[in-house]
Amino acid sequence: MAGQAFTLAQSGCEGLVSRRLRFGLLVAWAAVVAVLVPLALWGGIVGFEYFRDGGRYVSTTAASVSGDLVVVASVNAGRVVRVYPGTGASVREGDALAEVELAAPVRLTASGTPVLAFLGTTDQEVRVTAPVDGSIASILVAEGTAVTAGQPIMRIVDPAHLRVTAYVSEADLPRVRTGQDAEVYLTAVDRTITGVVQAVVPASSVAFATPPAAGAAIAPTVYAVFVRVDLRDTPQLLGSSAEVRIRVR
């Protein structure tokens, strides 16, 4: 009788454990489903958007802000006695950028050749002015430096003519056309601006590259695409990196 009671008790415990185990497995399975289903849905949405955007856009992270630099030089040989603006300063066409002192004859040699020297007088100074509106990108000489005629003194960048140069793979290039809208993300200021494809350079990177050494890895072939943007409020971005997304349809 006692043995029968023990058997029944043991059977009841095993049944209870079995039910708890099944319940635990059911809860675990429900938790897994609760996690996987949203992930699957999210993955499907992201995948759909990726393929949709892949058809609508050509994207690249190989891009940077570029522009044409205007070189400022002294027409005359002499010595730079003053440099007015600092790097990054805004200037207007005609603003004074530097003063160059011209050498003056102080005496003649026995053969009649004039000997030149800097006298330190203002009447021998020639002013160098800005040829265009813009910002000082770099100053190439210090005060007291002797310069030759035509030697660069500084460089000016025109913020109104900055652009973004984006490098697009040869597989994507056939879809890129002049006039297409583009989105440009500027890493330095964490900002996205709009632009328009201005030109596609009709030569690949291979055309300008040095031939690789034997056995060296060959770099992917890319083409430069110029995107016109308005960066007049942030001319200091020249040379900074960017990400570009061109809408191709």
Image: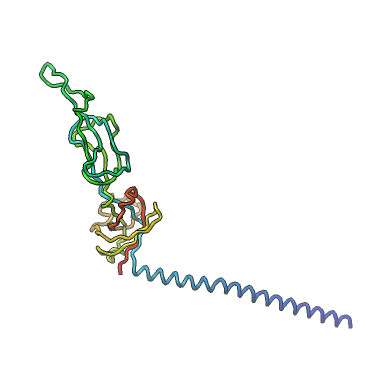
Report the number of numbered marks: 0
Task: Find residue 229 and report its horizontal and vertical position in percent.
Answer: 29, 57
Residue sitting nearer the eye, 12 or 186: 186
Task: Find residue 33 and report its horizontal and vertical position in percent.
Answer: 57, 74
Q: Say which quarter of the image contains residue 103.
A: top left
Is residue 59 positioned above or below 154 on the image? below
Q: Quadrant of the C terminus?
A: bottom left
Task: Find residue 14 and report its horizontal and vertical position in percent.
Answer: 76, 78
Residue sitting nearer the eye, 148 or 193: 193
Is residue 99 positioned above or below 185 on the image? above
Q: How is the image coloured?
A: rainbow
Residue lying farthest right? 1
Query: Who's the residue at 17% across and 23% down the image?
Result: 116
Residue sitting nearer the eye, 177 or 120: 120
Task: Find residue 145 and report its horizontal and vertical position in percent.
Answer: 27, 30
Is residue 34 positioned above or below 176 on the image? below
Query: Who's the residue at 52% across and 70% down the image?
Result: 39
Residue lying farthest left? 112
Is residue 114 positioned above or below 154 on the image? above
Q: Quadrant of the N terminus?
A: bottom right
Residue sitting nearer the eye, 146 or 32: 146
